[in-house]
Image (spheres, rainbow, N blue to C red):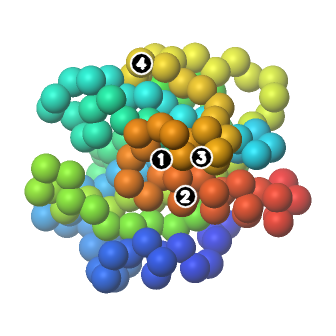
């Protein structure tokens, strides 16, 4: 697995995210920024009150459900369940801690460059769209997701992927 240095400290909100990887008290989540040039795929979340960020735009992803599932396999599974797109080589940007509905959660964020071939569908949420950072500035976006999208675009351009 490839790892982009710097994000853990920047997005850890004062917590050492590496110390909370497992255990019954912490929930693990994954998401992926699919990059297409200067745009990132965003999901407009359903407006269901019981979910995290109803009606917000964010990176597609979800929860790691199985104790034997790796974070890489979880992000591939979640992304395909929500978009129909099969990630080939998601690269870990980093992780951060957040507390949706008082649940202690460690989110691992990945990125990958869009292959331009696979069809993107919307199997969860209201819609899926590639959006630029400029467009994201006028949307209601989940906390940290604009910064993560920007970092994913930068990394994909710097890595020459």
Is there CB contact under 8 Å for labels 1 and 3? yes
Q: Residues within 10 Å of mark 3 (few under 14, many from 20)?
A: many
Q: Earlier in the sequence, mark 1 or mark 2?
A: 1
* Marks 1 and 2, how far apart at CA: 10 Å
Nearer the observer: mark 1 or 4; the answer is 4
* Marks 2 and 4, how far apart at CA: 21 Å
Q: Describe the element under mark 4 as helix, strand or loop.
A: loop
| Left or right of 46 in this view: 155 | right
Q: Label 2: which residue?
A: 148
Nearer the observer: mark 3 or 4; the answer is 4
Is there CB contact under 8 Å for labels 3 and 2? yes
Q: Can the viewer see residue 74 in this picture?
A: no
**Quarter residue 3 falls in:** bottom right
Q: Label 3: which residue?
A: 33
Q: Describe the element under mark 3 as helix, strand or loop.
A: strand
Q: Earlier in the sequence, mark 2 or mark 4?
A: 4
Give the x, y percent position of residue 54. 27, 32
Q: Label 4: which residue?
A: 126
Residue at image point 51% right, 40% down: 138
* Marks 3 and 4, how far apart at CA: 18 Å
**Quarter residue 121 falls in:** top right
| Left or right of 125 in this view: 19 | left
Residue at image point 46% right, 81% down: 9
Q: Label 1: which residue?
A: 31
Q: Can the viewer see residue 3 in this picture?
A: yes
Is there CB contact under 8 Å for labels 2 and 4? no
Give the x, y percent position of residue 139. 47, 37
Is there CB contact under 8 Å for labels 1 and 2? yes
Q: Earlier in the sequence, mark 3 or mark 4?
A: 3
| Left or right of 99 in this view: 159 | right
């Amino acid at each position: 697995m490839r790892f982009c240095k710097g994000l853990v400290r920047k997005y850890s909100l004062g917590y050492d995210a590496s110390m909370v990887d497992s255990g019954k008290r912490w929930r693990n989540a994954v998401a992926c920024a699919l990059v297409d040039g200067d745009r990132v795929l965003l999901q407009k979340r359903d407006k269901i009150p019981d979910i995290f960020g109803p009606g917000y735009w964010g990176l597609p992803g979800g929860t790691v459900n199985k104790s034997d599932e790796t974070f890489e396999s979880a992000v591939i599974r979640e992304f395909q369940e929500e978009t129909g797109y099969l990630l080939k080589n998601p690269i870990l940007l980093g992780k951060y801690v957040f507390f949706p509905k008082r649940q202690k959660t460690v989110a691992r964020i990945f990125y990958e460059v869009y292959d331009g071939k696979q069809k993107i569908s919307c199997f969860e949420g209201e819609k899926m769209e590639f959006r630029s950072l400029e467009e994201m500035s006028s949307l209601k976006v989940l906390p940290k997701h604009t910064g993560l999208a920007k970092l994913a675009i930068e990394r994909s351009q710097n890595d020459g992927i």
